[in-house]
Every structure is written in C-alpha cells, then in structure tokens.
Amino acid sequence: MQNILFMTSQVRASFKRLKASLVPQLDQSPNLYERDKDIFLTRLERFWPDFYEAFQRIYGNRTDFEAELLTVGTLALDYFKGRALELQNLDLEREISRDWFQREKLAGGIYYVDLFAGDLKGVRQHLDYIRELGLNFIHLMPLLQSRPGPSDGGYAVADYCQVNYKLGTMTDLADLAGELRSTGMSLCIDLVVNHTAKEHEWARRAMAGEPEYMDYYFTYPDRTIPDQYEKTLPEVFPDFKAGNFTFYPQMAGGRWVWTTFNEFQWDLNYTNPAVWRGMLGYMLFLANQGVDVLRLDAVPFMWKRLGTDSQNQPEVHDLVQAFRAIVQVVAPSVIFMAEAIVPPYQLLPYLGVGRHTGKECEIAYNNSLMVLLWSSLASRKVTLMTHSLQGIPPAPAGTTWITYVRCHDDIGWAVTDENAAAVGENGFWHRRFLNEFYSGEFPGSFALGEVFQFNPRTGDGRMSGMTAALTGLEKAEQTGNEPEIELAIRRILLLYSIIFSYGGLPLVYMGDEIGLPNDRRYLHDPLKAADNRWLHRPPMSWERAGQRHDFSTVTGRVFSGMKSMIAARKGLPQLHGAGQVQPLWTDNEHIFAYLRQYQGRKLMAVCNFSEQSHFVSADLLWQAGFSWPLQDVLPPELLPVSLVDNRLLLQPFQAMWLVDSEG
Ligand code: OTU
C-alpha cells in the first residue's frame, strides 16, 4: 500500500489513527478473508484523503470531528462486512472496468413500479418486455416507504430501509437486483437526500421536541430568520404552497420548518454530521441490497446560505465528495446520478470539476439537451440549440450524461436570455412561445401539453405532457389523421435518435416506446389532482403494448423504430460515453448536426427538424475528415448515401447517422 506516501501529514495521521482502530475489528471478523482485509484497507487508504478533505471543510471546526471520523470509518467497515460475495465480485469487475456506465452497449428505461407492473414481482415478470426493446438499465421511480397520503410521487420518504409495502419488500428489491445482475442489467433507484417526509422517524422525534432531532432539520421559533432567507429564495412549487417554510403549531411551542418542496417534505440540516452519517448509512444499506446507481434527488438544495438561492452551494460538493469516497470504499460498483436540473455552469460541478475532479457523481441529467430538443421541435429551427450546446463543456473524464427526451417531471424552459440573444431571439418571449406552443394555444400547434406551476409574478411556467402529446401523436391519433400520425411518429423517433447518439446513457421514458398518450385519470384522484405532472405518468397499457409486433399499428411503428435504433447504437463504438461530441453549424437552419468521435472512429448525425424535406451541404462531413462513400447506419435506412450536387437530402424529420468506410 503506497497511497499513504502521498497523503498530507494531517490526513496521514488521521488515517493511521483510523487504521489502528479498525485493524483489530477486521481481525475479529470471522467471515473476512485476509484478502478482503487488504482490499478494504487499500480502498480506504485510496479514498481517505478525498473523504477527509471534504469532510474537514464542512465539519472540521467541531470538537467532535475526530470522533466523527472514527464513526464513519467503522460504519464503512460494518457495511463492507455485510456485502454479499456476488456484489464484491461485481465491485472488483467494475473497479477494473471503470467505464461500464459509459459504454455504448448500455441503454436504459424509467418506470414507476406500480404503474408499469403493479409491484416489484410484477417488474420481474415484465423484464422480458424491457429486454425486448434492448434496454439493460432500469431506473425505478421512488419505491422506498413513503408517507401515507400525498407523497410527491414517492419523493417524501418515511423509511429508507423499507420498500413501499404496496410495491413489495426489501427482499423483493434485492431479488430483482439479483436477477438483473445475473442477466447483465443494472438497477437505479432514487435516494432523496435533501429532505425526508415529516413522518420519518427523525422528523417525528423533531416534531415531538427532542432537541437532538430538531437539529436534523431547520426549524425556527418565529419568522425572523425565514423572512431573511425568503428575500432570495425562489419557489419551486408556487402552486402547492407559498414560500419555503411551513408553520407547525404542535412543534415545541410552534415552529417554522424549512420545506422547499411540499409542506410534508422537510429539508435536512447537513450542518449536523449526524444527518450526513445517517444518509450515508441509507446509501450503504441500499448498495448492499444490490442497487447499482443511486439517483441523488434534489441534490442542489442540500446546503443553505443566507443571501443566496440556497442551491449549488460549494458545501454541496463537499458533502457529495465525502459520500462518494466512502461508497467507493464499501461498494465501488455503485455510482451516483446527480439530479440537478440547473444551468450547465452549475451542473458540471456535480460531475466533479476543480478540486472535486473525479470525486463526485458519475452521471447527471443533460437537461439542456432535453429542453433544446423541444425548443427546436417547436420552432423548427436549430440555431438556438446549436449555439447553446456548443457552449456546454464536455462531461469531465470518467463521467457521462444521462440523455433523455422526457422524464416524470415537468420541462422547465431552461433557455438563457444570453443564448437566445446570441441567435437573435428574446429569451422571455421564446420561453413564453414554448409554453403556448406545447399547451396547444399557439395557432397551428400539434401539442397537447399543460402548463405546470405558472408563476404570474415572473411569467414563468413549465410544461407537463407525454412525448406522444407533445409531438402531436396524441392529437393526430384522436382525429385519425394518417399524414399527421406519420409526422408525429417521425418526430418521436427523431428526438430519440438524438438521445441514443448524442453521448451518454440514454433513458427511455416509460410508455414512450409505444407512444402512450397523456393520462387524465389523475384528476379523479384527490392525492394527485393538484399536480398535473401526473398527466405524463400513465399506467402502462399492456393492451397497446400487445400491438407492438404489428407494424401496421402506430404502436408497432414506434416500438420497432426505437428498438432498431437501440440495437444500432450498441454496435457503434463511436458512441461510447468517453468520446467527444461536437455540435456543428450547417448551412440550413432546420438541420442539426453533431460529430461523435471515440478512439479514432467517427459518426456524424444530421437531423431535419422540419416537416419539409431539406438539403444540407456535405461539406461538413469532408471538413470533419469523412471520406466517400458514406453509409447511413441509423435504421431503418442502413443504406449507402447518395449526394445531389454535394448535398444530402433529408426527408421530413429524418435523421442520419453517417459513417465512412473507416468508421
Ligand atoms: C425532484 O425534482 C424530483 O424529480 C421531483 O419529482 C420531486 O418533486 C422533487 O425533486 C422533490 O423531491 O424541482 O420540478 O434541481 O429541479 O430536485 C422538479 C433539482 C424539481 C430540482 C429537482 C426537483
């Protein structure tokens, strides 16, 4: 073990103290082999500086800091001892194959357990369906025990060590993870790190006035401090409640509790190391059930600072770095997905930049790409998208994006005024146009979405609706308009072709593969009616899915289109997540192009965002070093490409994945 040679004296001293206290515990562990002890200590030595430095910046001034370090080390050892052999083998495999989540062979899907298959056992029964599409990674929406009553779709967790009883048991979850593992699939679940339900044990004890637990949350006897914070805090869900604090008269003589989201979601106080340690325990517990990816929900909100919006504070990155260091010691096959829907310059740090390089989350949502796809589809112009994407730095080495078209949340129109102005648009009016277009108000719009959380004060609104509703498929199917249906299917496949090839791990949103429309039944459920995000959380229609092999049906056309693109992606090493992506200007404002490169192989994607056929100059290929002849490897074409006067002809909403004989 040589890492110790490179530690600063302070870190080395703390590591030595920790080791001295852990070695006897290791020696007394009957089910650990000598080799296991070496592995644990080698990893601990490797990651201790990452942990120590981050942890010290947050908690270093506390008198109990040294004791905290020992407690964390012991906690890590306890979970290491409890790690199943199969998972230890996977740890080893992924320590060797660090790029496992960047591979072009990976493609994923997002599912609500209950809506997709009733419960976890049902999910196991439907894995064939997921595999048929070619997916080998599944993100299951919140499935831990949530509070009774409204739970924000499960994002108000009352017990992190239990599965929601309606969905099954922790054993069911471990069994599902095991089955996925044995077939080369991976499992991602949500870990809500920013808040707990007010029914969580910590919150119940805080509510009962126990000082130890009151320190797990931010509570105030009057409005003095909340009012100071409110001056600079935005409201995430202005329709659900005003402000970021909720008054609980029954709590210790009446207290205001910090509740960024809903009144029943209490923000955790990470200035208290017991909170950090408690959350770490949940992470390691879930890792030992066989979960591969933890989606850190609402991670930007984890640290509060007066005079700011209390998002993306530097301390958040220390908290995450400290989490990751310990997870790497216990369960290095597990990675973090950052759920940070924030502008690119604030998002990149979640993948680790500066002193955090290589020390934070491995994957993060490419929210900008998602928003710009929808923006281009509405305007039929790719100028704003090309300009904006060119301004996004590449994902740091060893990390990659999650690319997606839709997810369970609303679409917030994250188009900056600066980027809009740079291409001659007005940001405010463009965002307003997008709301009008996708809610169907704009003349000629094909969309059937609904505005979410319109804020009259700022004029800001977000969008709800399924892909099928936002691309015009739902409307066209209602009227049985075949040409419109055809265009809408092409729009869906166009957007998905981009997320399958732009770079990163693509996630298909449940139901998109069969063009499921909006679901208005939520309006009859009092627990859901106020939240129109349920519009795009429909139960799976197995009836509709049953038509997927009939190519004369809409379902069959969407499903087979998506399936063949996923299969094509897996055969293209150019699409490995460690490769580069370069959005390029073309000579046609309707045609988006990007170059993908990895290990000397190239692929050029060209995408027509209009319902008319368009030409684009092939010069962009020659300038990027492509040579004749070219082939389009995006199904269903798979054809040699012909040029007309050095121009490529693209049909309405057609995309091409072009390679030359070298690719
Ligand atoms: C997340 O989203 C979840 O995805 C939502 O479904 C939850 O309601 C929410 O957290 C609370 O748990 O504001 O509009 O930058 O954008 O955390 C969705 C991150 C949200 C936030 C994000 C949040």
Image (cartoon, rainbow, N blue to C red):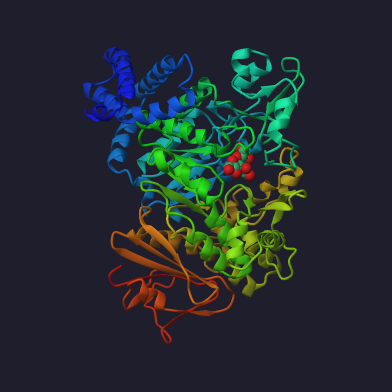
Of 97 and 194, which appears nearest the observer? 194
* Horizontal relation, residue 520 to residue 403: left or right: right
Name which quarter of the figure residue 662 lies in.
Answer: bottom left
**Residue visible at 55% across and 41% down in the picture:** 141
Q: Is residue 310 above or below residue 554?
A: above
* Horizontal relation, residue 179 to residue 368: left or right: left
At which x and y percent is residue 312? Answer: 55, 39
**Residue visible at 66% across and 25% down in the picture:** 198
**Residue visible at 68% across and 70% down in the picture:** 480
Q: Is residue 450 above or below residue 243?
A: below
Of 373 and 440, which appears nearest the observer? 373
Q: Quadrant of the N terminus?
A: top left
**Residue visible at 45% across and 50% down in the picture:** 401
- Figure quarter occupied by ligand 1: top right
At which x and y percent is residue 291? Answer: 43, 35
* Horizontal relation, residue 375 to residue 86: left or right: right
At which x and y percent is residue 256? Answer: 72, 25
Name which quarter of the figure residue 45 lies in.
Answer: top left
* Horizontal relation, residue 546 to residue 262: left or right: left
